Image: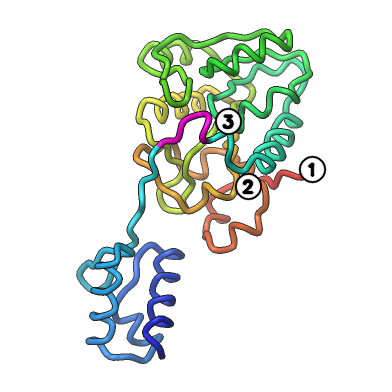
Amino acid sequence: MLTEERHSYILKKLKEEGIVKSQDIIRELNCSESTVRRDLILLEDAGHLKRIHGGAKRVYDLDEELSVVEKSAKNVQEKTLIARYAASLIKENDVIYLDAGTTTLAMIPFLNKNITVVTNGVQHASLLVDQQLRVYLLGGVVKNTTKAIVGVNSVSELKKYRFTKAFLGINGIDEEYGCTTPDPEEALLKYTAIQQSSNSYVLSDHSKWGKVNFAKVCDLDEVTIITDQIKHLKNHNIFENATILEATS
């Protein structure tokens, strides 16, 4: 077997399972221990994995947080599809939490029911008021990058409310590490919203799958995930641990 083929096999196993054992590679690929050791050294030097005793483990790249403007330009069609579907789940007289984020922002044009909305998004609150909805904006510190309100005050306020549904943005979804975001303060606020809601939905286009960020929000089984096309998830072993809804037009 060619070196490139062995490397491809090792990386595929790491993506699927997070860890790979040297003895398994030797057995599956019918190669020598010295060959596997050399392959793992080369892949570690390239930044693809970290060698551990008896094998290797997956390396995660922690993405930097993009600004609202940068996020708005990415996967626009997918976000609109997900947003429209998420909005269709809202019923008359629902009390919802609408998290800051570009996908949740895209829900607002489709919110045409008699509902009450609590949000930590400055832009969200302005647009919601324009639609004549009843809106509560959390107090706290406004982040320059995402225009989200975070901090101790916002968490304290959020704990005073109960919601029929919460709709959350997310930066990364992984079968092992769950839902993650770059900012611990935002992670805490998102998790608090989940705790205060009867039903919690994470809105995520396929580009977020397989990514891990600094701060964990929740495990996959704590929320329902709305995504654009489930076919994009074929390489992620998350179906046993997550409830996934596919957004349809």
Decide whether residue 69 is among the magenta residues: yes
- Kindly report the distance in space between the C-alpha atoms of the residues bearing marks 1 and 2: 16 Å
Classify 10 Å Cα crowding around label 3: few (below 14), some (14-19), many (20 and above).
many
Along the horizontal axis of the image, is 223 left or right of 144?
right
The residue that label 3 is drawn on is: 102
Choose between 199 and 87: the one closer to the eye.
87
First in sequence: mark 1 vs mark 2:
2
Badge 2 marks a residue whose secondary structure is strand
**Quarter of the image where the N terminus is located:** bottom left
- Tell me if label 1 and label 3 are in contact, CB under 8 Å: no
Where 71 sits versus 177, above or below? above
Q: Quadrant of residue 180?
A: top left
Identify residue type, mark 1.
Ser
Which residue is rendered at x = 69% and y = 23% of the image?
Answer: 108
Q: Residue 247, position in %: x, y?
A: 71, 44
- Kindly report the distance in space between the C-alpha atoms of the residues bearing marks 1 and 3: 19 Å
Badge 1 marks a residue whose secondary structure is loop
Identify residue type, mark 2.
Ile
